[in-house]
Image (tube, rainbow, N blue to C red):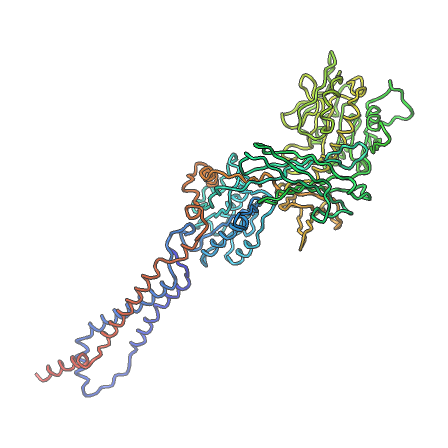
Amino acid sequence: MSVLHPGLLAAGIAAVAIPIVIHLLLRRRRKPIKWAAMRFLLEAYQKQRRKLKLQQWLLLIARCLLVVLVGIALARPLVQSGVLAGGSAGRTVYLVIDNSIASGVRAAAGGTALDRHKQAASEVLSGLGPGDRVALVTLAGPAAGVVLPASADPAAVRRIVEGLEPLDSGADLRRAFELVGSDARSSADAGKSASVVVLSDFLEGAVDLSAPLPAALAGLDDVRVIASSPVASAPENMQIVSVEPIWDDPGDLRPGQVSVRVRRVGAAVSEAVSRRVRVFGHAERGLGVGGAHQKPLADGVVRLARGAQEALAPLVLDREQLDPGQASGQLVLTAELEGDDLPADDERRVVVPLRDSLRVGLVAQRRFGAQRMTDFRASDWIRIALTPLLSVPIEVVDLNPAVLDAPQLAQVDVLIVAEPHLVQDAGWGQMRRLVDRGGLVLVCPPTDANIHLWTDSFERAFDLPVRLAREATTFAAPVRVVPAETTSGVLRLIKGELPELVRPVTVSKALPLESEEGVFETLFAMEQGQPWMISMRAGHIEEQQASGGGGLVLYLASSPDPAWTNLPLMPLMVPLLQETLRQGIAESGSRATTVVAGEAFVPALGVRELVLEREGEPIHASASVGGGMTLRRAGVWRGVDEQGLRGVEIASNPDADGARTGVVDAGALRAWLAGASGVGADPVTSVQWLDGEGSSEGIGQRATRSPFDLPLLLGVLALVLVEMVLARWASHAGPWRMGRGVRDASERQAA
C-alpha cells in the first residue's frame, strides 16, 4: 500500500510528539507550599496515585492516536488496484505514444488517432503521485526517447505530449522497446516497479507479426507492458506508392510522362473505385510548389477495378508549363491523390534532374583520324550508337583511362568504360564517387585482353557482391540473347519492341559472372540462362539500404565488337545504349535524391544539414557522427554545405507501408508484444490491456481514489469522543469526586 501525500503522512507521525511534550511540560516540579489541610490531601493522593497514572497514560495514548490517524487520513493511502498501481511510491511509467503516419487517421466523430492517444496519456499523467517518474518515447521511426531518462515533472511531460503531431514515418516498436529496456536497466531506479504504457491503434503498418520483437525487457521482472487494445475496424485508405518519370522524346531531356502507382489498403476491395490524380511541378525558380494556385502539369483519374488493390495511372506532362529558362537544375514532381481519412500518404514526390544535354564520358584510348569500319573498336561502335543524329542532346567526352580524376568526372553524368584494363586504382575510386552521388557507370570487357585482371579492381571499387571470370568464354556456335523479366525501368520505353529487336542478336564470346541470387537485376540473358546485361547498386545490400542506394552500375558481359557479338550491327544497338543511359541516369538521380521518411540515408558529399521550409520556423536535420541522416517529415528538403550554401534538393516521401490501415488480431498482437519480455513469456501475464478492455477512460484515476477515506474519518471522530470522555474522567471535575478523598481521610482521622 502507498499513499497519495507521503509528506502529510510524515508530518502527522511527527506531530505525535506534541501531546507527549505537553504531558512532560505539565509534569514540571513546583516548589511545595504547606498549608493546614495538606495532610489530608497527601493521603488522598497516595491512595489515588496508581489510578491517576493509568488515566494519564490512556489519555496520552488516545491523543497520540488521534494525531496519527488525522495524518494518515490527510495522506490518503492507496490500494494496489488499477493498471498503474505500483508496488510502492516512486514507480516509473514509460509512455510510448504512436505519432507515426498511421496516427493521422481521422475518426468519424472528428479528431485523429493521435488525439485519442494524447488524451489517454493525459489521464495516465493525472494518476501519477509526487514520487513517480515518467518517460516519453515516440514511435515515429526511428523511435525517439523524447523524455529519457524519466522525469519527475509530469507537468512538463504533459506539455510535450500536447505538442505532438503525426509525422510521416512508420511506427518503430522495435527500437522503442530497446530504448525502454536499456533505460530500465541503467536507470538509478532499476529494480523499482515500472510500467510500459503503449498507446497505439496497432494497425498493420505499425505491427509486423512475422518479425518477433527483441527481448528488450527480458529479466526485468518489475517491468510490465500495458497496451491499448487494437482497433476493431479502420477506414479504407488510398495511397500513392510510387511516382516514376518517363523520358519518351529522344530529343528532349525533360520527362514527358509520369507513372503514378496507387494502392488501397485497410478495407474490402469488393467495389470499384476512381480517384483524381494531379501532378504539380516546381523547379529552382519559376514555378511554385503544387497547390490550388498553380495549374497542374498533368491531371487524370486512376481506376481500381473490383478486387484490385493496385492500379497504375500513366499521365502525360504538359512540358509548356515548365519554365523555359530552367534548362538545368532539378525539377520536383509532386503527385496528389484525392483526399481520404489519411491525407499524409496522398502525396508523393520525385526529384528529376534537368539537363540541356547528357554528357557521357567514354573511357577508352582516343583515336585520331577517320577509321574504316573494319578497323572499328568497341569505343567507335559506342560513339556511333550514342550520336546517330545531331539533334540528340547527348555529348560524348573522351576520357583517358590511365588518368581519371575528380575534375574530369565532375563534368559528366554517365561513364562507359570500354577499356577497363587500362584504368588505374585511383580511377576506379573516382568512378565509385560518381556512382555514390547518383551517376551511372556502364562497364564492358576489353576486346583484345586474354586474361582479365581488371575485374578485381572493378569488384573492389564498387564493393559488388559478384565475381567475374578471369578468362572469357568462347562459344562453339553463337548463342541467342533473350530479354529477362525485370522490374527495372531502364528499358521501359522499348520494352514492347524488345522481342523483335533482340531476336537477331547473338553472342560469340562473353566474360561471365557469378553471384548470389537477388543481388542484381538481369536485363538480358543468354539462352542458357547466364546473365548477359545486368543492373546493380554499388555496395552490399546493407550498405545500399543505409545509403539510399546511390547510382547504378551496369555490366555488359560482351564487348560491343563484332568479334564478341553482332550487337553493333543490329538495330537494337542504338535504342539499347540511348535508353539505358537516359532512363538509367534518371533512375539513379531520382533515387539518390528521393528518400522515404524514417529510413536512414547518406546525403550528397559535402551536405552538412537539410532544411525543410514550411510555415513558421524551418525544420533542420543534421547528419549523425557517421554521416547518415533520417527524416521523419515528408517534403522537399534543401541541402546546406559547410559554407551555408544551399544546393541539392531531396524529396522525402511518406512511408506508404507504415500507413497500411488493416486491423490485426488482438490475440496475435498480445503474443507478439509479449516477445519483448523474453522468449516463452506468457502473453496473458506479460501484456495487460488498458482497463481490461482497451478503454483509456479512467486510466490511473482508480489509483488516485483512496478506499480508506470514510473509515479513517469515522475513526478520527470516534477517537475525538474517546479523548473527550477520558479527559473528563481524568480531570476529576465535580464536587463529589473532588471531595471524596478528603472526606475519607477526615473520617479516618476522627476515628
| 10 lies above or below 216 | below
Where's residue 268, x and y in %? 53, 36
Relative side of 354 to 625, left or right: right
Name the foreground residue: 149 vs 311.
Answer: 311
Single out the residue that lies furthest toward the right.
Answer: 369
Outermost residue toward the bottom in this view: 36
Is any atom of residue 447 visible in this view? no
Along the viewing direction, whichever of 186 and 663 lies nearer the viewer: 663
Residue name at image x 56 percent, y 39 percent: 660
- View extreme (top): residue: 476
Using the rendered view, name the quadrant where residue 680 is placed: top left
Q: Is residue 141 above or below residue 55?
A: above
Picture quarter with the C terminus: bottom left
Q: x and y percent of residue 144 in the render?
A: 57, 47
What quarter of the picture does the N terminus occupy?
bottom left
Q: Residue at x 73, y 34 (%)?
A: 246
Residue 743 versus residue 280 in the image, above or below: below
User: Which quarter of the picture shows residue 105?
Assistant: top right
Q: Horizontally, is 308 left or right of 371 in the view? A: left
Q: Taking the image as drawn, is residue 578 in sight?
A: yes
Image location (x, y in percent) of residue 373: 87, 19
Q: Is residue 521 left or right of residue 207?
A: right
Q: Position of residue 434 (x, y in %)?
A: 75, 36
Quadrant of residue 599 within the rendered picture: top right
